Every structure is written in C-alpha cells, then in structure tokens.
Amino acid sequence: LTLCFIVISLVMILIFIKGLSKEPESQSIYSLAAIGVKIILEMSLALVWLIIAKKTGVISVILFFVLYLAISLYSIFFILKTLKKKSL
C-alpha cells in the first residue's frame, strides 16, 4: 500500500517537473494535470483497497487514510517549495 502511494506521488511529481520546463502558458496545465492524475490514481487505489480487496476493517481504513494524508502532504509541500523558487 505504501509503495502504491509512493509510485502515485512520483508520477505526479514527474508530470509537475516536466511542466516546469515548458513555456509559461502550459505550466499551469501540467500542474493541474499532475494533480488530476494523482486524484484519479488514488481513487482507483481506494476502490481496489477498500472494495475489491475487502479491506474494510477499522485498522485498514485508518491505515489507508493516514498514508494518503502523509503522502499527499509531502506532495503539496514539494509543489509549494518548487513554486516558491519558480512561480508559474
């Protein structure tokens, strides 16, 4: 589960960094695409984890959301730190 969250965040970060090297008009599109891809992949992971794998115990649900929150906060802080250096 942790590996899945890390892979999703790395995909989001790669899309975001690729967008930083583009012209200013398309940087915001890449940023939004990175966040959109992250949300769609994490919703898919939630679907697999909670519904298909039948991990609906209280401990499993808490673990899922704690990992989601931790990795999401890391991604947000990474984006904010990068945008402070180079604004869109």
Image: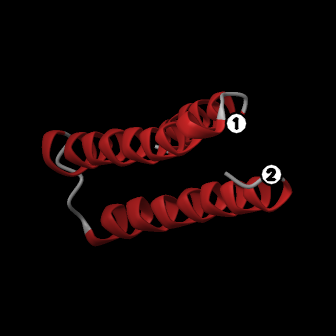
The residue positioned 43% from the left and 63% from the top of the image is 63
The x, y position of residue 46, in whole percent, is 27, 49
Q: Secondary structure at mark 2?
A: loop
Residue 12 visible in this rendered orientation of the protein: no
Depth check, front residue: 11 or 79? 79
Vertical arrangement, residue 30 with respect to residue 82, above or below: above
The residue positioned 55% from the left and 31% from the top of the image is 11
The three-letter amino acid code for the residue at tag 1 is Leu
Marks 2 and 1, the one that precedes in the sequence: 1
The three-letter amino acid code for the residue at tag 2 is Lys
Crowdedness of circle 1 by 10 Å Cα count: few (<14), some, many (20+)? many
Crowdedness of circle 2 by 10 Å Cα count: few (<14), some, many (20+)? few
Q: Residue furthest right?
A: 85
User: What's the distance in space between the residues labelled 2 and 1, CA to CA?
Assistant: 8 Å
The residue positioned 20% from the left and 45% from the top of the image is 47
Residue 86 as seen in the image, left or right of residue 54: right
The x, y position of residue 7, in whole percent, is 55, 33
Callout 2–callout 1 Cβ contact below 8 Å = yes
Q: Which mark is residue 20?
A: 1
The x, y position of residue 1, in whole percent, is 46, 43
The x, y position of residue 45, in whole percent, is 31, 42
Q: Which residue is mark 2?
A: 86
Instruction: Please tell me in which quadrant of the rendered image residue 61 appears.
Output: bottom left
Instruction: Please tell me in which quadrant of the rendered image residue 62 appears.
Output: bottom left
Depth check, front residue: 34 or 45? 34
Q: Secondary structure at mark 1?
A: helix
